């Protein structure tokens, strides 16, 4: 029997003070978040911020708990607690930034993707979001010695034109991210998908450099502080570990050199600056707000 959104989605925003130009960020741990890069990026972004949970999705109908097992923990009072997979929507206010954010930093569900996606649509609609940005990470032919590239796509023609984003051309099996973006399209809520590259030859390691690249891109375009500079020590530590994994292997070293040459050639092309992208996005969102008023 189909699950109803009202049965699984709880909201707590009736007394919420108005949000400024809200945009939603979504990252889900799972197939489209190699190395947990996107979700760890949002963890870093939220680390020093006050976040208020305004909605959550009941995990019970969406997970096979033999795959995503709940955890048993002892709390500060010595009481035993069960921690279930969480998909909480949090409000982060940025008085020093251009807008406030709604953040879902959660876990990809196993089943009922359509209902899960409709929960995201209902929260975005209920909180007046004019844009949803989904974040992910993929294994790419990118060298660990360079700043990872962030690529974006959108089905919105105006956003694609303004920001120089690609239009999705993929056909074939998809995941919950594809279902979610389709649901947002149907609801007429503009969305952007951002993906950062992870070196495929080190995909089982941690990649704070990729997380920082994703956060820096968000900071430029959305006009919010993401505190990506706090990752400097982690980047340095993992750079040494990645270098050690490649050193001493002649074939691996030659392969990385080839990837570096390809990367440097790509970066020579003219690419829009972060400031240009931010200005174009602001103009787009201003148009969205004007449409809502009219």
Image (cartoon, grey):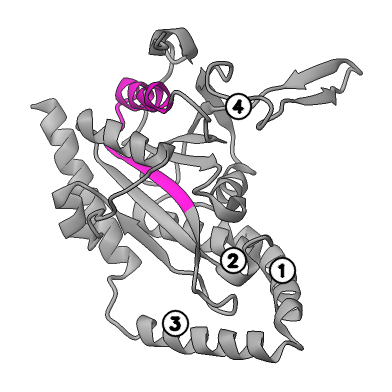
Residue identified by numbered label 1: 238
Q: Are marks 4 and 1 in contact (CB under 8 Å)?
A: no
Q: Which residue is mark 4?
A: 86
Q: Earlier in the sequence, mark 3 or mark 4?
A: 4
Q: Is residue 130 above or below residue 271?
A: above
Q: Position of residue 236 (x, y in %)?
A: 70, 72
Q: Are marks 2 and 4 in contact (CB under 8 Å)?
A: no
Residue in the picture at 22% in, 63% down: 164
Residue 105 position (above or below residue 284): above
Which residue reaches farthest front?
A: 172
Alpha-carbon span between mark 3 and mark 2:
16 Å
- Residue 200 lies in the magenta stretch: no
Quickly name the residue at label 3.
263
Q: Residues within 10 Å of mark 2 (few under 14, many from 20)?
A: many
Residue 290 x, y percent position in the rendering? 13, 35
Mark 2 = which residue?
209
| Residue 216 can be seen in this image | no
Q: Residue at x 57, y 51 (%)?
A: 41
Give me the C-alpha separation between circle 2 and circle 1.
8 Å
N-terminal of the pair, mark 1 or mark 3, is: 1
Q: Nearer the viewer, residue 226 or 266?
A: 266
Provide the residue span drawn in magenta.
113-136
Residue 108 vs residue 186: left or right?
Answer: right
Q: CA distance from mark 3 to mark 4?
A: 37 Å
Q: Quadrant of residue 184?
A: top left
Question: Which residue shows up at 34% across the image and 21% down it?
Answer: 122
Going by the image, does 27 lie left or right of 236? Answer: left
Q: Reading the chain from its start, which is encountered first: label 4 or label 1? A: 4
Seen in the image, is 53 located left or right of residue 150?
Answer: right
């Amino acid at each position: 029997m189909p699950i109803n959104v009202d049965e699984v989605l709880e909201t707590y925003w009736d007394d919420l003070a108005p949000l400024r130009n809200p945009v939603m960020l979504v990252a889900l741990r799972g197939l489209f978040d190699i190395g947990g890069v996107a979700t760890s990026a949002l963890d870093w972004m939220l680390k020093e911020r006050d976040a208020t949970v305004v909605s959550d999705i009941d995990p019970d109908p969406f997970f096979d708990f033999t795959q995503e097992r709940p955890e048993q923990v002892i709390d500060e009072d010595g009481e035993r607690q069960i921690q279930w997979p969480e998909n909480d929507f949090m409000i982060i206010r940025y008085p020093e930034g251009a807008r406030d954010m709604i953040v879902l930093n959660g876990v990809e569900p196993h089943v009922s993707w359509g209902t899960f996606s409709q929960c995201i649509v209902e929260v975005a609609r209920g909180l007046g979001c004019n844009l949803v940005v989904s974040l992910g990470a993929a294994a790419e032919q990118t060298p660990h010695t360079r700043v990872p590239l962030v690529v974006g796509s959108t089905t919105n023609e105006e956003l694609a034109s303004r920001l120089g984003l690609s239009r999705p051309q993929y056909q074939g099996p998809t995941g919950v991210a594809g279902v979610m973006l389709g649901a947002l399209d149907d609801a007429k809520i503009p969305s952007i998908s951002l993906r950062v590259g992870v070196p495929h030859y080190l995909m089982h390691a941690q990649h704070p450099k990729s997380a920082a690249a994703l956060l820096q891109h968000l900071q430029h375009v959305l006009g919010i502080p993401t505190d990506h500079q706090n990752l400097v020590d982690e980047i340095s530590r993992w750079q040494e570990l990645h270098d050690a994994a490649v050193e001493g292997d002649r074939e691996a070293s030659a392969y990385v050199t080839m990837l570096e040459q390809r990367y440097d050639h790509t970066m020579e092309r003219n690419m829009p600056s972060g400031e240009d992208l931010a200005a174009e996005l602001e103009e787009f969102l201003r148009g969205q707000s004007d449409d809502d008023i009219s």
